[in-house]
Image (cartoon, grey):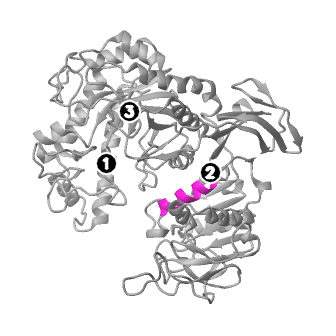
Amino acid sequence: MHKIGARQVHLDFHTSKDIAGIGARFDKKQWQKALKLGNINVINIFAKCHHGWSYYPTQIGNAHPHLSVPDLMGAQIEACHEIGVKCPIYYTVSWAVNDAEQHPEWRVLDRAGKPEGINVDFAATPDMPRPHTSWEYLCPSGDYLKVMLDQTVEICDRYPVDGLWYDITNCPYERGLYGRACYCPNCRRGMAEEGVNIDDPAAAEQYAVRKWKRFYEAARALVLARHPEAVVYFNGTTGQHQPGRMWEHNLQQDLEDLPTTWGGYNKFPLRARYFQREGRPYVAMSGKFHTSWGEFGGFKHPDALRFEASAMIAFGARCNFGDQLHPSGEMDIPTYKNIGEAFRYVRKIESYGLDGRPCSTLGVWWIDNSSPSVGAFAAEPNLRGVSEMLLENQIDFEIVENADDLSRFAAIILGGSAGLKDDDVRKLEAYRKQGGKLLVMGESGLDAATRSRFILNVGAEYVGCPLYKQDYLQVGGSLGRRLVASPFLNCAAALRAKLKGAKKLADIREPYFDRTYGKYCSHRNTPYRLETASQPGAWVLKDLVYLAHPVGYLYHTEGARLHREYFLNALRMVYPLSRQVLATALPSGGRVSLVHQPDQRRYCAHLLYGPPTPRGCCQVIEDLVPLYDIPVTLRVPEKIRKVHLPVSGKKLRAAVKGRVTGVTVPVVQCHEVVVFEY
C-alpha cells in the first residue's frame, strides 16, 4: 500500500489569460508558512488547468502567457519538499479551453457531430454572462491523447514527482451507464476498427469505457516507470454507483463529496463503506469554501471543518480540503489557519481511524447503475436511503458483493433494485442455509435480466409492477411497533406479489385512482380505498423479510420518520440488537463508525454529533451541542482489558459480561473516539 498523508489540500489554480501577473506574489517562505499553519502534509499543485495553461516551461503544452515566475510549479515543488510536504501534480484532461480553441478537432462530439460541454451555450456572444462550471469536453484520443501522454513524460522527467492527479476523466457519464459515447472522427474510426455498431448506444458507451481505460493504463505506466512510489489517480472514476470499475487503475481513491452543496453529509459515508473494501487508501474531498469549487473568498467556519475532518477519519478516510490559489500566487493565510485548526485535531485521532478493518455484522448488498430498475426502484436513491436510515439509527454496516465472504454477517440488506444474477443467488442461498438472514426490499428479489420473476426463494410469486403511482400501508404486530394504526402514504407504490408459503406482515390500500387532470381529489394525492388490496405490503419466510416498497427511495425522497421506523422494525426481525457489534444511544443526528486495528490489538469506536442545518442553497454545520453520558456497548470475541479516550487521556470504567463490554462516555461534542484494547 502506498503511504499517503492524511492532512491534504487540493489547491485549485485555474487562471484566465485575461489576468496578468500570474504567480507574481509567490514567496517560498510565505507558502511554507501557510502549509505549516495548516498542519498539511500533502498538497495537490497544478501543472495544467481547465483554461488549458501550464505553470512550468513546457515544450509540449502551452505555458500561461502571463507567468511572472517561469517555473511556478517547480518553485512550489521545491518549497513543499524542503519542509517534507508531498505535492502530487494536477493535470486536467477533458476540460482545457485553450486546447479546444486551438484544436476544435479534439472536442467530444455528439451523434449529430455537435460539440459537447457542461453549461456551455455554443451560440453565446462574448458579452453574455457565463454560468459557473462551464467547459467544453475534449476526447482522450488521437493527437490530443499523444499530447497528454508526452506532457506526462515531460513532467516526470523534469521533476521529483510524488503523484499525478488527472482531473475530469471518464466524463460525462451521467447520461449513460458507463461513459457517454463520443462520436469524434477518432472514436468513429476506433469503433469501426473494433466492429462496434455505432448506432447502438450501449455498444458505443462500452467503447468509451475501453478508450478511457486505455488512457488510464498508458498514463499510469508512464508515471510509475519513472517514479515507482508515485500515487496516480484519475478523478471522475469514483462516482457513487458508477459501473464498469472505472477506478481500477487508481492507486488511491479520492471521494469528491462537497457536503454543503453536492448531496449533503450522508453521501460520503456510503461511498467510504464501498471503497474501504478495496484495500487501497481512500481520501475524502471537501472544501474550505462555503459552496463549491472555483469559489474565491468563501469560507466554512473552523467548527464545520473540524466536524468534516473528524467524520473522514472516523470512516477510515484521509482528509482533503479544497482551496483555490489567487492568480498572484500568494497563499491566503486565514484559510490555512482555519484548516489548521481542524488538522491539529486530526493529528490526534488519525492513527485511530486509518488503515483498520471494518467489523460490522450487517451487510448491505451493492447494486450499481447497471441495474435495470428505474424510477423509484433505481439503485442510487435506494442505497442512499438505506444508508441514511442506518446512519440515523447508529447501526454500523459494510458493503458486500458476490466475491465477499458472507459468513461473518448476521444479516444482509438488499436495498430495492434488481441486480441479482444466478451466481449471486447461489451465494445468497448458501448463506441462508448457514443461518444468514435477509431483509429484501422493492425489486431486489427480481431477476436482473428480465425483472419478471423472483430469482430468490422469497415465499411469493411475482405478479407485476405497481398499478398506481402511490399507495398506502397498514401495518400491525411487531412490524407496526411505534407506527400509526391507520394506512399511511407511500410516494411510490409497491410491486405486486402473491404469497406462496410466506406469512403476510402488512396490508396495502390502493388509491381510488392516480391524480390526473381527468380525475383528482383535493390538493395532492387521492385517498385510499376502504378494501384491502390483494397483494401484500410485506411478508416473512423464515430467514427472510420482504418489504414490497422501495423503502430506501421513500426515505431518501421524503424523509418521513415512520418509513424509517418501519424499516428498523423489519431489520430487527432479521438483525436483533444482540447481533450488533457496536451499539449506542445518540440522537438521529449522531453517527458511529467502528474500526478494528488487529496489529494494535484494539477496536476504535468513533462517535460524531454535528447535525447539518439547511441554510440557503447549502447545508451548514454550526451548533456543535455537547451530549452527555452516552452508553456504548461492544460485542467482540476478544476479552477487553482497557477502555479509554485517547484525546483526553481519560480511562473509562467498563462493565464486562462475557463478550459484551459496556461503558459510559461522559461527553461527546463534535467527535469522540473510544478505544477498546484487548
Residue 629 in view here:
yes
* Residue 129 percent across, percent down from the top left: 18, 44
Q: Which residue is mark 2?
A: 391
The reply, left or right, for residue 191 in relation to residue 86 is left
What's under tag 3, amino acid-wise?
Answer: Gly
* Residue 465 percent across, percent down from the top left: 49, 80
Q: Residues within 10 Å of mark 1 (few under 14, many from 20)?
A: many
- Asked if 142 appears above or below 70 in the picture, the reply is below
> Which region of the structure is painted magenta?
379-391
Residue 403 in view here:
no
Mark number displayed over residue 298: 3
In the depicted view, which residue is nearer to us: 656 or 473?
473
Secondary structure mainly formed by the magenta segment: helix
Residue closest to the far front: 522
- Asked if 284 appears above or below 367 in the picture, the reply is above
Find the distance from the CA under tag 3 to the CA under tag 2.
Answer: 29 Å
Q: Nearer the viewer, mark 1 or mark 3?
A: 3
Q: Which residue is mark 1?
A: 212
Does residue 504 show up magenta in the picture? no
In the depicted view, which residue is nearer to us: 630 or 596?
630
Does residue 387 show up magenta in the picture? yes
Q: Earlier in the sequence, mark 3 or mark 2?
A: 3
- Asked if 477 appears above or below 233 in the picture, the reply is below
